[in-house]
């Protein structure tokens, strides 16, 4: 099953959602229960929806005013995909990044690996 632009937008909306309860709802919708999330800013991967939710909560505390938006269409080969995105801070360009993702059998994301640039 190919990873859709809509699914990528939902993943990025997790980063943009300020309300922790709504954010957790998005995580449950987008991420597999036993998901793995890792990026260049983590010392170890977040494993499972609750660890991922805690990581996003810490991000919101430390990096206020950030907005993530998709940069082009998702590139997908079967269950693997590449999602490019832009990051702005308080409306000003801040950086860009790429997620490499693996989809679970139920269509949610099982693994997400992130790389950031400026």
Image (tube, rainbow, N blue to C red):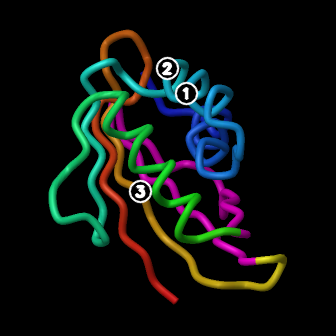
Q: What residue is rendered at 39% in x and 50% in y?
A: 55
> Mark 3 and 2 residues: CB-CB less than 8 Å, in contact?
no
Q: Nearer the viewer, residue 25 or 2?
A: 25
| Of the image marks 3 and 2, the number of the one nearer the N terminus | 2
Q: Which stretch is magenta?
A: 65-89
Q: What residue is rendered at 73% in x and 69% in y?
A: 65
Q: CA distance from mark 2 to mark 1?
A: 6 Å
Q: From the viewer's perspective, is residue 63 above or below residue 104?
A: below
| Of the image marks 3 and 1, the number of the one nearer the N terminus | 1
Q: From the viewer's perspective, is residue 83 above or below residue 115?
A: above
Q: Which residue is mark 2?
A: 28
> Mark 2 and 1 residues: CB-CB less than 8 Å, in contact?
yes
| Residue 69 as seen in the image, left or right of residue 49 | right
Q: Which residue is mark 3?
A: 99
Q: Which residue is mark 1?
A: 24
Counting from the top left corner in percent of width and height, residue 61 is at 56, 61
Residue 85, magenta (yes or no): yes
* Residue sticking out furthest to the front: 61
């Amino acid at each position: 099953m190919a990873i859709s632009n809509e699914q990528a937008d939902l993943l990025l909306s997790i980063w943009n959602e300020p309300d922790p309860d709504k954010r957790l709802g998005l995580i449950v919708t987008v991420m597999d229960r036993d998901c793995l999330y890792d990026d260049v800013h983590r010392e170890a991967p977040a494993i499972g929806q609750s660890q991922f939710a805690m990581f996003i909560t810490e991000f919101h505390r430390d990096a206020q005013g950030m907005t993530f938006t998709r940069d082009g269409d998702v590139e997908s080969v079967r269950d693997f995909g590449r999602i490019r995105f832009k990051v702005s801070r308080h409306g000003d360009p801040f950086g860009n990044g790429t997620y490499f993702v693996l989809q679970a059998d139920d269509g949610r994301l099982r693994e997400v690996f992130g790389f950031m640039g400026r």
